[in-house]
Image: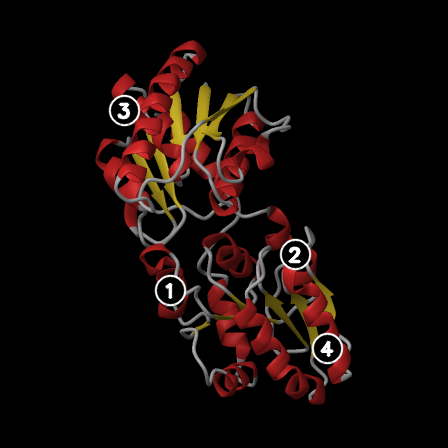
């Protein structure tokens, strides 16, 4: 098959495109990526050896624009859709797979117009505006939050499953602030650090490059030895050493922690589109597999209570929410057409 993957803008979308494309290529399919000159698309795939071809078209987000800005963004999407239709024809595409984000709009719309089967993977519990618009025209819609025929296991790197274990007590806590850093989580980590240190609990803290100097200095001032990372590609290895996580609830991080069976205390990013991080975390909470609290003052006591609770129950529950080879199963369903 000839498969086009499209979408991106942010790493959460692009990591899914990468995972699915790798599996498709392993199974002998030709793969092409169509993304945007904006966002992180070129950074991820500009020099990629995974794809047979990569194309970056001039587009920007539409929903965050107003007035003439929105009209300008829509005009760019229209022109990029025409180019995408041309690329779909030249590649003789058998399928177009959208992973969402503003980068997906041109190729996904072109697939519908060209009557090439469109497949959509939705990362979040709340369907994005573009995916909601195109879902009626898609041949398949994949979601890890829906039951029935649309359900799929979230594509997660195999390392998280390989290192998974049931946690029974908290010896190490990992704080995940994301590549940009989450100041609220960083401050909460520093606030609870003396309490953790007094109980002999080790701290791993991924705080973001912009916050690294401040966070390191704060731990030094407190006299606490913590593993501090501004940015690292070794999150899977750090998770293997961890028994409990404090994190935002972006989809990829949430499902990676789930695959590793690490109970997590989620603090959703309050300004996420459609509050999707809160709803992502609610899925875990509804299955009695973690904790979720809104970003606000006074979380210290609640976090202490969670760390001091019976974490085995949550860890075991996480193992029932996801199985390995999610990307392979999605590609298999696309192959069946």
Q: Which of marks 4 and 3 is nearer the N terminus?
A: 3
| Secondary structure beneath label 1 | helix
Residue carrying label 4: 219
Q: Earlier in the sequence, mark 4 or mark 2?
A: 4
Q: Compare residues 82 and 99 and report the one nearer the observer.
A: 82
Residue 283: image quadrant is: bottom left
Q: Earlier in the sequence, mark 1 or mark 2?
A: 2
Q: Can residue 198 be seen in this view?
A: yes
| Secondary structure beneath label 4 | helix
Q: Earlier in the sequence, mark 3 or mark 2?
A: 3
Image spot of residue 76 (x, y percent): 35, 28
Which quarter of the rendered picture does the N terminus lie within? top left
Residue carrying label 3: 112
Q: Earlier in the sequence, mark 1 or mark 3?
A: 3
| Secondary structure beneath label 3 | helix
Q: Taking 160 as reference, is 93 above or below it?
A: above
- Mark toward the viewer: 1 or 4: 4
Q: Is residue 263 visible?
A: no
Q: How far apart are marks 1 and 4 (CA)?
A: 29 Å
- Mark toward the viewer: 4 or 2: 4
Q: Which of marks 1 and 4 is nearer the N terminus?
A: 4
Which quarter of the rendered picture does the C terminus lie within? top left
Q: Taking 41 as reference, is 308 above or below it?
A: below
Q: Taking 103 as reference, is 251 above or below it?
A: below
Residue carrying label 2: 235
| Secondary structure beneath label 2 | helix
Residue lying furthest front in this view?
Answer: 68
């Amino acid at each position: 098959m000839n498969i086009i993957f499209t979408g991106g803008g942010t790493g959460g979308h692009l990591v899914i495109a990468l995972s699915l494309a790798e599996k498709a290529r392993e199974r002998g399919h030709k793969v092409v990526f169509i993304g945007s000159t904006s966002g992180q698309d070129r950074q991820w795939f500009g020099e990629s050896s995974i794809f047979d071809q990569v194309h970056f078209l001039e587009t920007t987000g539409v929903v965050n624009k107003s007035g003439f800005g929105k009209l300008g963004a829509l005009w760019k999407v229209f022109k990029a859709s025409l180019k995408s239709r041309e690329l779909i024809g030249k590649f003789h595409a058998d399928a177009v797979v959208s992973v969402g984000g503003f980068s997906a709009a041109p190729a996904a719309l072109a697939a519908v117009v060209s009557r090439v089967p469109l497949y959509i993977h939705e990362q979040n519990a709340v369907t994005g505006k573009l995916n909601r618009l195109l879902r009626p025209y898609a041949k398949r819609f994949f979601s890890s939050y829906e039951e029935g025929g649309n359900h799929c296991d979230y594509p997660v790197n195999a390392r998280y499953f390989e290192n998974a274990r049931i946690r029974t007590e908290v010896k190490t806590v990992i704080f995940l602030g994301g590549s940009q850093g989450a100041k609220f989580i960083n401050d909460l980590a520093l606030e609870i650090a003396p309490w953790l240190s007094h109980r002999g609990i080790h701290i791993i803290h991924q705080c973001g490059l912009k916050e690294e100097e401040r966070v390191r200095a704060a731990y030094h001032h407190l006299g606490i030895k913590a593993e501090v990372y501004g940015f690292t590609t070794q999150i899977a290895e750090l998770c293997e050493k961890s028994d409990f996580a404090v994190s935002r609830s972006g989809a990829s991080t949430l499902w990676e922690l789930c695959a590793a069976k690490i109970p997590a205390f989620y603090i959703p990013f309050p300004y996420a589109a459609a509050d999707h991080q809160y709803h992502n975390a609610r899925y875990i909470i509804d299955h009695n597999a973690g904790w979720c609290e809104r970003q606000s003052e006074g979380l210290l006591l609640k976090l202490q209570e969670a760390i001091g609770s019976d974490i085995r129950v949550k860890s075991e529950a996480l193992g029932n929410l996801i199985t390995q080879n999610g990307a392979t199963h999605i590609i298999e369903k696309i192959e069946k057409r």
